[in-house]
Amino acid sequence: MGTGTAGTAEGGGRERPIVIVGASLGGAKAAEALRAAGHQGGIVLIGEEHERPYERPPLSKGYLLGTTPREKIYVHPPQWYGENDITLRLGTSVVAIDPAGHTVTLADDGQVAYAKLLLTTGSVPRRLPVPGEEQDGVLYLRRAEDSERIKAVLRPGARIAVIGAGWIGLEVAAAARAAGAEVTVLEAAELPLLRVLGREVAQVFADLHRDHGVDLRFGVQVTELTGTGGTVSGVRLGDGTTVAADAVVVGIGISPATGLAAAAGLEVDNGVKTDQHLRTSDPDVYAAGDAANAFHPLFGKHIRVEHWANAVNQPQTAARAMLGQPDAVYDRVPYFFSDQYDLGMEYVGYVEPGGYDRVVFRGDPATREFIALWLADGRVLAGMNVNVWDVTDPIRELIVSKRVVAADRLADPNVPFGDA
Ligand SMILES: Cc1cc2nc3c(=O)[nH]c(=O)nc-3n(C[C@H](O)[C@H](O)[C@H](O)COP(=O)(O)OP(=O)(O)OC[C@H]3O[C@@H](n4cnc5c(N)ncnc54)[C@H](O)[C@@H]3O)c2cc1C
């Protein structure tokens, strides 16, 4: 059973396949979900990277630390694609979409016809807009080879400057300290992760890194990367001082990869805009993962989520929607995790910067074994468990219920979340 009509480009004469652009976590999960949902027609998974789909979280954790071997990062074993009749085209960029003709154009000029198209094009690191950024030793982290380049400079005594105290910057700082490097983290805001976590919880991460010997500098502006002979040697700051560095790792956020969608006339606004079925402004084109700015029924607005769980789960909804199942709606509460030193955490929920009026702690944040809950108008918007496990489900239920809770009961470890 296919979903399409006869093809005109590659594969002419056969039913048109479902084509997925972006062969990473989201793309591979979509292919898996299509087969799980019973789709027997063609599936073509196209990706510009040369590696088969792999997971990125280890790139700033176990793979960077050297504790997770290469074979553990892949989404599926190599034979899985053949066994599931998925045409995997690696090292292949899609350069254009023709929504009217239902084709995508490849960099080598070939075309692939589609019945339905899924964009899982992900995101790309933001470049640091200062002079000297193009020098050797200035490193970004998105791909496996980026992680390998960073790993190569994390040596005992090496001076590593990390620009940006977001999740990537902090995880790299932790890996660099584990390797014995001297680490300076430079951040424009007053605390790490301030926009995501707010002041109360951001402080926990500042203390964590200071306790592990990281030189944290907040409220600084990077004006230039200095160097000699094309190799970086330091970071110049707005106050005229320079932080000497053997390598600079930049983690200042990502931008959704929307160029293809925009050029094809699809609606784009902070990602490829979709409805709750993950369908874009073209009825035969869908988007999922980091690239998608999807309408979320629980929050009543479009949100774009740059996390692993979203790239695992959204493709399942998109797959079912592409197969014509009208009840395929994406309404999961966002979830993510991080590991730094001996701190492991999970976060569930969604809070816009400054969008809460109170943080309730269950446990003492100074012990780094606690749960934080962000509230607005007495309702729980999000929760984060730090070195405490198996609480995500009840916290998620509180968020979804949108009911007003008693803050003192929420803080009491003897009261189940459901009774708070
Ligand atoms: C170092 C690192 C650590 C992370 N750690 C965590 C974590 O701890 N917890 C967490 O929740 N999340 C984490 N994330 C985020 C998580 O990895 C992403 O949310 C997830 O990878 C998104 O998957 P995706 O498939 O949507 O996009 P991506 O993983 O970005 O993949 C998109 C793919 O599409 C390809 N592509 C783009 N355009 C084209 C084109 N025109 N033609 C062909 N191919 C194209 C790209 O090359 C890429 O391979 C981390 C990310 C990074 C980089």
Image: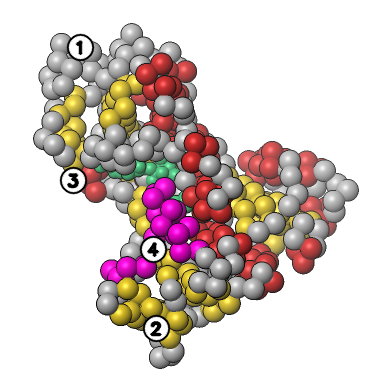
Q: Mark 4 points at which residue?
A: 139
Position above or below: 236 against 302:
below
Q: Distance between the residues labelled 3 and 4?
A: 29 Å
Marks 3 and 1 close (CB-CB < 8 Å): no
* Left or right of 12, for residue 401: right
Which is more N-terminal, label 1 or label 2? 1
Range shown magenta: 133-154
Label 1 crowd bin: few (<14), some (14–19), many (20+), radius 10 Å? some
Q: Which mark is residue 236?
A: 2
Q: Distance between the residues labelled 1 and 4?
A: 45 Å
Which is more N-terminal, label 4 or label 1? 1
Q: Distance between the residues labelled 2 and 1?
A: 59 Å
Q: Distance between the residues labelled 4 and 2?
A: 16 Å
Membership of 145 in magenta stretch: yes
Position above or below: 78 against 274:
above
Identity of the amino acid at label 3? Ala
